[in-house]
Amino acid sequence: MGALEYYTYRDYQSWEGEWELIDGEALAMAPSPMKTHQQIAYALSFELNRSIQECDLCQVFGEEDYIVDEATVLKPDIVLMCNDNDDDFITKAPEIVIEVISKSTARRDEEYKFRIYEKEKVKYYILVYPDGLRAKIFKLYGYTYQKEGDFFDQEYHFEDLECSASLDFKRAFKKFKK
């Protein structure tokens, strides 16, 4: 991505509407996501939150600003944060980031954000495809993501987190199966 104009977090704060900022380039968010996109995001948030109910160290957030640096601000669909002391924004790498893929932003999520989350050492990056009710889970090994697999109706248990966490895709996707 090569920006014609370079923007910073200070610029971002003054904009109206929904935006992301990647390497100084302003990127408008797609119009409000389809109902299915929002419902799947909610179902996944609910399942993830349910799995950490006994842990006071971690929290699940939806569409919260993740300030990577002055030139990059992302708005992930879902994050799991542990030991976060900042009440206003996400300023350190989340443990888990989930992006529900929209056709208009797929490339951004699959390529640009993938590289950013990998560089920032987000332990797990999950791409969810509403059309196929499929989730691709990537786990960080050292400095590189490796694909853990495609998940349709399995349960996945996350390792190396402050809290025991899991996602039951069968339960999360059940309402959307036809």
Image (cartoon, helix red, strand yellow):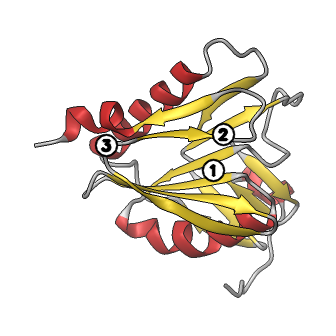
Q: Quadrant of residue 118?
A: bottom right
**Closer to the N terminus: mark 1 or mark 2?**
2
Residue 95 in sight? yes
Determine whether, in the image, residue 23 is placed left or right of residue 100: right
Which is more toward the observer, 138 or 102? 138
In the displayed structure, 11 sits above or below 95; it is below
**SS of the residue at dot 1?**
loop
Please report the residue visible at 10 percent of the width from the left and 43 percent of the height from the top: 178
**SS of the residue at dot 3?**
loop
* Circles 2 and 3 in contact, beta carbons < 8 Å: no
Please report the residue visible at 36 percent of the width from the left and 67 percent of the height from the top: 103
- Which numbered mark, 1 or 3, is in the foreground of this view? 3
Which is more toward the observer, 163 or 131? 163
Percent x, y of residue 151: 38, 52
* Circles 1 and 3 in contact, beta carbons < 8 Å: no
Q: CA distance from mark 1 to mark 3?
A: 27 Å
**Closer to the N terminus: mark 2 or mark 3?**
2
Amino acid type of disc 2? Glu
Residue labelled with disc 1:
75
Please report the residue visible at 39 percent of the width from the left and 31 percent of the height from the top: 43
Q: CA distance from mark 1 to mark 2?
A: 6 Å
Amino acid type of disc 1? Lys
Residue labelled with disc 3:
153
Disc 1: CA contacts within 10 A as few (<14), some (14-19) or many (>=20)? some
Please report the residue visible at 32 percent of the width from the left and 30 percent of the height from the top: 171
**SS of the residue at dot 2?**
loop
**Closer to the N terminus: mark 1 or mark 3?**
1
Amino acid type of disc 3? Asp
- Which numbered mark, 2 or 3, is in the foreground of this view? 3
